[in-house]
């Protein structure tokens, strides 16, 4: 099978599309023919070993996982002897940030892992990016207790996490203010943001409104910048470690505070999560935003584009075409 393989850490050019053996499913696993996957920030970080401490999880001198790709959509090609939740021919989507492997024509995944059947009427290219960014924002919104009537500000509302956060916060009943560049105001408004702040013309930190929750979905602002925008018991959270990796320390410093707090959750990756996201897609409350689509043979170009930090939503990789077994 074809797969995008990296045998060493480095820039996008370390990735090569080569032929490798097809994986064999264990008794409790599915063999999935991948129709679509993505290139995202996680893939870039694991490929380049940046930040440096990633090596403690991925291999000190060279990658343990040579085939990256953590989210996918495809068709079940074969099942192990103990599989009873899926059948050959099922259209499935899912997420695996432990073994990766989606940048290939086939992957294996446990039937009790983060995998589900696809909603009816949705294409592989739509469902492939339905888990990575969205599961992060779902963790942040849940730990912050976002609910009906809450005022939520999403900074960086056009990335994979931010664009999902706007939609999912709205599905929870929150009133969303989103911050983005001027050329994307209409897009973000269409995602459900009640207010959109054009950061290219307005300093969002001078906003007169106060918020129950602020989510920095791109890791480019700080608690210090945003603290005054929070209500007295408001919560600030970010997808990044922050300046000088301060955010985990701020969690400890504000943990017992009766006022404003910083939260930095570890996202849950399980069947409940993927089923929840499936339900949001089925009910038209969440649709992944797609910027560009590349063929697997052009995955190096996809990596280069993602690393420009200009992508809007998700970058999708097509691996197999619909209608072909």
Image: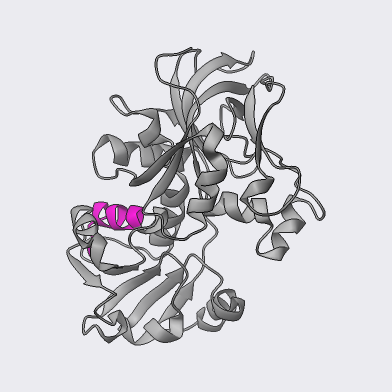
Image location of residue 172, percent across then percent down: 27, 55
Quarter of the figure with residue 182:
bottom left
Image location of residue 237, percent across then percent down: 44, 70
Does 69 sit left or right of 158 as displayed?
A: right
For residue 2, above or below residue 179: above
Image location of residue 322, percent across then percent down: 40, 19
Here the colouring is one colour
Residue at 57% across, 34% down: 102
Residue 191 makes an appearance in the image: yes
Q: Quadrant of the N terminus?
A: top right
For residue 224, above or below residue 21: below
Quarter of the figure with residue 84:
top right
Residue at 54% across, 49% down: 303
- Give the number of callouts: 0
For residue 240, above or below residue 135: below
| The magenta stretch spans residue 131 | no
Image location of residue 206, percent across then percent down: 27, 86
Residue 178 makes an appearance in the image: no
| The magenta stretch spans residue 167 | yes
Does 271 sit left or right of 323 as displayed?
A: right
Residues 180 and 98: in front is 180
Residues 160 and 29: in front is 160
Residue at 52% across, 63% down: 265
- Which segment did they paint magenta? 163-179
């Amino acid at each position: 099978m074809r797969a995008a393989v990296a045998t060493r850490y480095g820039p996008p050019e370390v990735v090569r599309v080569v032929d490798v053996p097809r994986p064999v499913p264990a008794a409790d696993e599915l063999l999935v023919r991948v129709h679509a996957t993505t290139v995202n920030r996680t893939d870039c970080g694991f490929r380049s070993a940046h930040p440096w401490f990633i090596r403690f999880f991925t291999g000190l001198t060279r990658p343990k996982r040579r085939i990256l790709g953590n989210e996918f959509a495809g068709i079940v090609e074969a099942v192990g002897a103990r599989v009873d939740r899926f059948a050959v021919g099922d259209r499935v989507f899912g997420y695996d940030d432990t073994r990766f492997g989606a940048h290939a024509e086939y992957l294996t995944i446990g039937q009790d892992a983060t995998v589900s059947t696809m909603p009816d009427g949705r294409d592989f290219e739509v469902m492939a990016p339905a888990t990575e960014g969205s599961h992060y924002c779902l963790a942040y919104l849940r730990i912050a207790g976002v609910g009906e009537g809450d005022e939520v500000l999403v900074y960086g509302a056009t990335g994979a996490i931010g664009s999902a956060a706007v939609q999912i916060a709205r599905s929870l009943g929150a009133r969303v203010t989103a911050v983005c560049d001027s050329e994307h105001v209409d897009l973000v408004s269409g995602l459900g943001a009640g207010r959109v702040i054009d950061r290219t013309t307005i300093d969002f930190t001078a906003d007169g409104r106060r918020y129950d929750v602020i989510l920095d979905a791109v890791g480019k602002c700080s608690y210090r910048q945003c603290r005054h925008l929070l209500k007295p018991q408001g919560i600030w959270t970010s997808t990044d470690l922050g300046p000088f990796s301060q955010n985990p320390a701020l969690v400890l410093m504000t943990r017992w505070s009766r006022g404003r707090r910083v939260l930095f959750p570890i996202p849950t990756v399980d069947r409940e999560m993927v089923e929840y996201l499936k339900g949001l897609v089925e009910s038209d409350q969440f649709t992944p935003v797609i910027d560009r689509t590349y063929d697997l043979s052009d995955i190096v170009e996809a990596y280069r584009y993602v690393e420009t930090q200009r992508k809007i939503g998700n970058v999708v990789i097509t691996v197999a075409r619909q209608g072909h077994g």
